[in-house]
Amino acid sequence: MKIFDTLHKFVQDNHYVDVEDKLDIFICSIGAHIFNALNKCSRCDFDPDSPLINYEEGDYAIEACPLRHPNMPFYTPMAQLPDTRIHILIRGNKGSGKSVLINLFLAERTGLLYYQNADFGEGFRTMLAPNSITEAGMFGSVDEEGEIVGRPLAREMCGGFLGFEEFSSMSDAAKKDHSLDMKNQLLTSLDNGRVQKAMRSGWVRYTTRYTVWAGTQPARFELDSGLDRRFFIIDIQMTPEKERLFKQAQHRQANTSPEMRLDIANRTIAIRTWFRQRMEQAVAKPPTGIIFDDDLAEWIDRPDVRSFEADLFRRLAIGYAMMQENYEGGGPLIVKLDEKLRAILNQSLDMRRRVMDADLELIRSTFWMKDLPKSQLVKEISRMITNGDYQMAKVWIEENLEGRAWYSEYTPTKTGRGRKGVTCRFGNPAEPVKTQKWGENNEQN
């Protein structure tokens, strides 16, 4: 099955609107998720056969996980074990269809990745997360005896896909006293899977490999420094024309004939089966390595791809290669930049620049052709972008302003006592103006 073409035809026949440039990213995310498991899941914190698991002490185990295997890692750049999961954040206004994409794959009973017997080792584990969650509910806490209490989602969903219809539930929880550690735990669990908390009564410590797909509204779009490196950004724009198309699509969906409904149900089963079989094929016969072609390296080297974004697009290419029609395994995974992958990369880069550069343009236009002390700039960015976080404002300057042709920093020459502060200049760089001593070269004196 050519899964990219098949899924596009599936959504067209179901009258989905404005998903053509977004659907492929979800398919690549599934492929990257499988690849990550092939490379890392030989080390499992929840293997019931592991000597480290002690049922008498209440240790948690996932009895049947189809991703668990005994194979050694094969992708180890810089002698490290990288994470290749692609977490997706969809930004769009109310009614723009953010939840539609997540539900297409994860909705209970009807989702293309949903398996009723997932807990028994059939297919992927999937869940739509609750609308309200605490840090303890997401990552866990311990009782007085030092045992992890409840069923924290990050542990429960290891190897699965977790969907948030509104990601602000996570950022809102991080502002409350009981969940102040939410952001830090989220960063590490999305990056390398590690959850580690030292508490008064004991440790919360495990490694999880879940993939997050989430939606958020523009007014609630908050990506602290670090989260933007973990998420692939999808932007959904609303227009009056799209509103009209949504209403027309709803009419067609409501009038679908019984014959077409049966056909769609059968195709849903076929697509779901293909995803499961691709996972099983890859686990049974994983790659022995990976080779990226020079054309992909050239695309990633383009100037509008930031250095910290390069790995995100490399992961997308890995996921694309894993989801091709013919999978062989047993040899190196060849990641080639064909025309379809080039189109996916270009479309996804356009969406990311549109979202991620909005704050940059705000700062650029606000202070254009102005000089101001760096301490003042940090305060302004803290107020306008990082929600009062002074340290994050400093990091934002380093990651977004430094190196721009229209931004420069210099220390003005001045006399007198006191510290010589750094001045930030927005506009064409020029030689800094030296401050004269009183009376120097002054003809009036």
Image (cartoon, grey):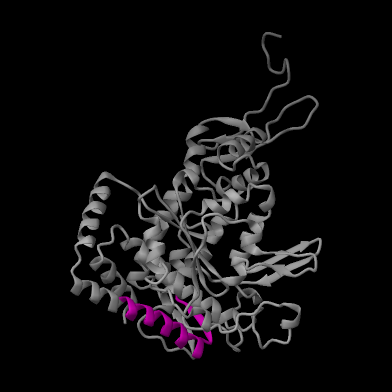
Q: Who is closer to the viewer here, 329 or 255? A: 255
- What residue is rendered at 23% in x and 49% in y? 244
Q: Position of residue 370 (x, y in %)?
A: 54, 30
User: Residue at the spot x=42%, y=89% of the render?
Assistant: 328
Quadrant holding the N terminus: bottom left
Tell me the quarter of the picture where residue 157 sits: bottom right
In depth, the one of 136 and 190 nearer the eye is: 136
Coordinates of residue 138 in the picture (x, y in percent): 61, 62
Q: Residue at x 65, y 44 (%)?
A: 394
Which residue is located at x 58 percent, y 73 percent?
158
From the top left corner, tell me how far across and down residue 327 is, in percent: 41, 86
The front one of 39 and 59 is: 59
Asked if residue 337 is positioned above or below residue 229 in the image, the reply reads below
Q: Position of residue 5 (x, y in %)?
A: 29, 74
| Prevailing SS of the magenta stretch | helix
Q: Is residue 227 above or below residue 118?
A: above
In front: 38, or 292?
A: 38
Is residue 377 found left or right of 265 in the rendered image? right
Whether residue 421 is visible: yes
Left/right of residue 302 with respect to residue 416 in the rendered view: left
Q: Which residues are magenta?
A: 268-293
- Location of the C terminus by quadrant is top right
Residue 399 shown in magenta: no
Q: Is residue 365 left or right of residue 409?
A: left
The quarter holding residue 136 reads bottom right
In reply to whether residue 282 is colored magenta, the answer given is yes
